[in-house]
Image: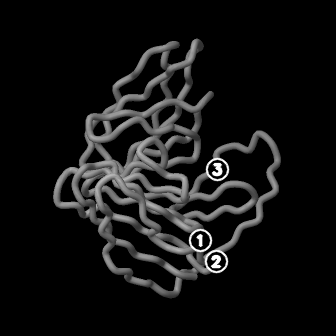
Amino acid sequence: MAKITIPANTERRISTSGRWLSIINASESFGITAEEFTDVVGAVGRQYDLNDISTVFFVNGRDEPLHVEYEVANLRITSTASNNVKITNALTVERVEQPVDVFATSIAATQANSLDDVIIEPLSKVKLIAANNLRHELLIKNISVGNETVRIGSAACSSTNGLPVVKGGTLSLTNGAEIYAYNTSVEQAKLSLLEVLQ
């Protein structure tokens, strides 16, 4: 785990030798960029699947210093916000500064639903999957032939919003929402999907 301070209106090169980049703490949201993808928002609680990306940049576009605590590892760690906590790896608590009421649940996924590959025409949007309250997780992998980048999100996703998934990248969504994908390229894109049900 690393703690850094980035001066106002500057960026910091971050070596990412592990596959997963997790933002543990940050004084404000910030930008994350790399040669392999466009700007994404860096925020507390987010985890990024970097696959073969070895360097990213944390961008502080504000007029005051940015304090970031982050972790790069080959271990995927999943957590949920609010009053629900799900722990996939061991957790050690060193100190509790304020009492916290937590409702913990254990979710056992019992089924996997392999879905057909989805082809997305250039500069167009498709609905990947309908809403499903029984969905525990949705895995989306960009298996495009070329270097197409697809943006994943709600019905409003477009070339300028939604989470980008580059060729070879995988996105994991742990909710049952309706999900759309937008192909930002002038070539066809192809996604493979796996739905894990509770």
Q: Which residue is tagged 2?
A: 133
Estimate the spatial distance between the alpha carbons at disc 3 and disc 2, rounded to whole Å.
Answer: 32 Å
Q: Are marks 1 and 2 in contact (CB under 8 Å)?
A: yes
Q: Earlier in the sequence, mark 3 or mark 2?
A: 3
* Viewer-nearest residue: 125 or 80: 125
Crowding at mark 2 (Cα within 10 Å: few <14, some 14-19, many 20+): few
Question: At which x and y percent is residue 5?
Answer: 51, 20
Question: Quadrant where the C terminus lies?
Answer: bottom right
Crowding at mark 1 (Cα within 10 Å: few <14, some 14-19, many 20+): some
* Viewer-nearest residue: 124 or 91: 124
In the rendered image, the residue lying farthest to the bottom is 111
Q: Secondary structure at mark 2?
A: loop
Estimate the spatial distance between the alpha carbons at disc 1 and disc 3, rounded to whole Å.
Answer: 30 Å
Looking at the image, can residue 63 be seen? yes
181 sits to left or right of 65: left
Q: Secondary structure at mark 3?
A: loop
Q: Secondary structure at mark 1?
A: loop
Q: Are marks 1 and 3 in contact (CB under 8 Å)?
A: no
* Viewer-nearest residue: 1 or 64: 64
Q: Residue at x 53, y 81 (%)?
A: 197
Tell me, for residue 93, which label it has, or none.
3
